[in-house]
Amino acid sequence: MGHLSFIRPCSEQSRVEIFLKTIHQLSRRVKIAADELSWVLKEEGDFVNKLFHFHFLLDGSNMPNKDAAKLASSFGKLWVKSGGGNHDVRPYTVELDRHGFQRAVNYVTKIEGFCRVPFSPFFNAGENCHLKFSDGLDRHLAAVCSADTTQNQKDNHE
């Protein structure tokens, strides 16, 4: 999971291109197709109240090397190499907040009330939340939901 910033203000298209370039470089490094990587990306900021930046989660469960610390270090280096700025990328740890929710998931999915962001064709989202799932994560979630639905149908007919 991580926080990614940019060296200087740039368009949303440029910000997304830097992220996707990092993902493609990571896919080559870990020898897995880029469209098989599962990630969630969140954009925040408006350059008035807060600089644009990304929060993200990357699922490494289908990667051959599951060393999360090494993966986090590699991602951070690739982010800078791809044209990104500062980053705070670290292995995901399950920590619960005072409400019992996982901190990392809350961190990525929170909605900031003060910060309205313009409509985005990439994120295909309104002004409250710019959240994007990778195609790999979409397929994984569809498979999990389909399997759960099939199992529920079997359970209900028995």
Image (cartoon, rainbow, N blue to C red):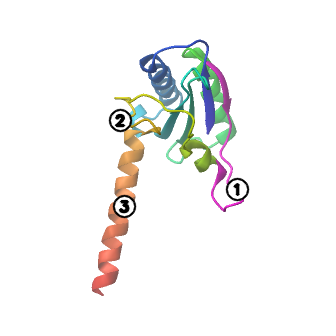
Q: Secondary structure at mark 3?
A: helix
Cα distance in 3D space between marks 1 and 2:
29 Å
Q: Give the residue drawn at x 63%, y 47%.
A: 104
| Type of the residue with mark 2 | Asn
Per the image, the residue denoted by label 2 is 124
The stretch of residues the image draws in magenta is 85-103
Residue 58 percent across, percent down from the top left: 54, 40
Give the answer, above or below, for where 83 lies relative to 141. above
Query: On the image, which quarter does residue 76 sit in?
Result: top right
Residue 19 is marked as none
Image depth: mark 2 or mark 3 in front: 2
* Secondary structure under the numbered disc 1 in the rendered image: loop
In the rendered structure, which amino acid carries the disc numbered 3? Cys
State the residue at coordinates (52%, 42%): 63
Indicate the position of residue 145 as horizontal and vertical percent values: 37, 61
Q: Which residue is mark 3?
A: 145
Query: Camera-side residue: 14 or 110?
Result: 110
Three-letter code for the amino acid on which mark 1 is drawn: Asp
Q: Nearer the viewer, residue 77 or 19?
A: 19
Q: Which residue is mark 1?
A: 97
Q: Name above or below for residue 85 compared with residue 33.
A: above
Left or right: residue 100 versus residue 116 is right
Marks 2 and 3 sit apart, C-alpha to C-alpha, by: 22 Å
Residue 157 screen position, x and y as percent: 27, 84
